[in-house]
Amino acid sequence: MRYQVMLEYEYEVDGQKFRSGNISIGDATITQLHQGLRSRRIAEKIVQSYPFYSSVNVYYDPQNPARATLKPGVRSGNLILWLITLLIPLLTAVIILLR
C-alpha cells in the first residue's frame, strides 16, 4: 500500500503570485510524495507538519522565484548521492591512469 501526500502553497514575489508543492529541493523522499510513500507514519508526519491554511516560510531562488521550497539547505542523503556521483568518475579515471 502507498500513501499519497498532496501539498500546495502560494507565495508572492514582487507582486507576482507563484504556487509550489516542494518541501525540500532534491529530497528523494519528497519527490515520491505524488508517487506515494510506503510509510503511513511518514505521510502523516508530513501532513501534520503543514496544517491546512497555515502560514509557512517559503524560501525561493531570487534568480528564479518559481523555484521554491519550505526546507532550504542540503539534506544528508543528497550530499551522499552527490559524493558518490563525483567519486565514480574520479575512481574510474584513476584506474585508467594506473593501467
Image: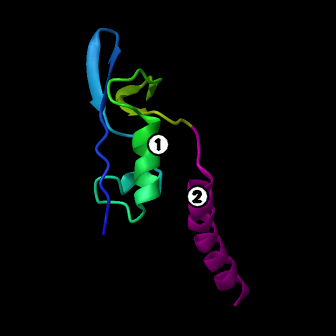
> Neighbour class for label 1 at 10 Å: few (<14), some, many (≥20)?
some
Between residues 34 and 61, which one lies in front from this camera angle? 34
Residue 91 occupies which quadrant of the picture? bottom right
Q: Is residue 39 left or right of residue 11?
A: right
Report the disc number at residue 36: none
- Label 2 is placed on what type of residue? Gly
- Label 1 is placed on what type of residue? Ser
Residue 75 in the magenta stretch? The answer is yes
- Expressed as whole percent of the image width and height from the top left, the position of residue 77 reads 58, 58
- Expressed as whole percent of the image width and height from the top left, the position of residue 33 reads 34, 53
Q: Residue at 42% of width from left, 34% of height from top? A: 50
What residue occupies the far bottom of the structure in this picture? 99
- Expressed as whole percent of the image width and height from the top left, the position of residue 84 reads 60, 67
- Expressed as whole percent of the image width and height from the top left, the position of residue 27 reads 47, 51
Tell me the magenta residue range.
73-99
| Residue position marked by numbered label 1 in the rendering | 24
| Residue position marked by numbered label 2 in the rendering | 77
Between residues 64 and 20, which one lies in front from this camera angle? 20
**Which secondary structure dominates the residues rendered in magenta?**
helix
Q: Residue at 40% of width from left, 52% of height from top? A: 43
Residue 22 occupies which quadrant of the picture? top left
Determine whether label 2 and label 1 are within 8 Å by CB.
no
Q: CA distance from mark 2 to mark 1?
A: 12 Å
> Neighbour class for label 2 at 10 Å: few (<14), some, many (≥20)?
few
Q: Secondary structure at mark 2?
A: helix
Please report whichever mark, 2 or 1, sits nearer to the chain's N-terminal start.
Answer: 1
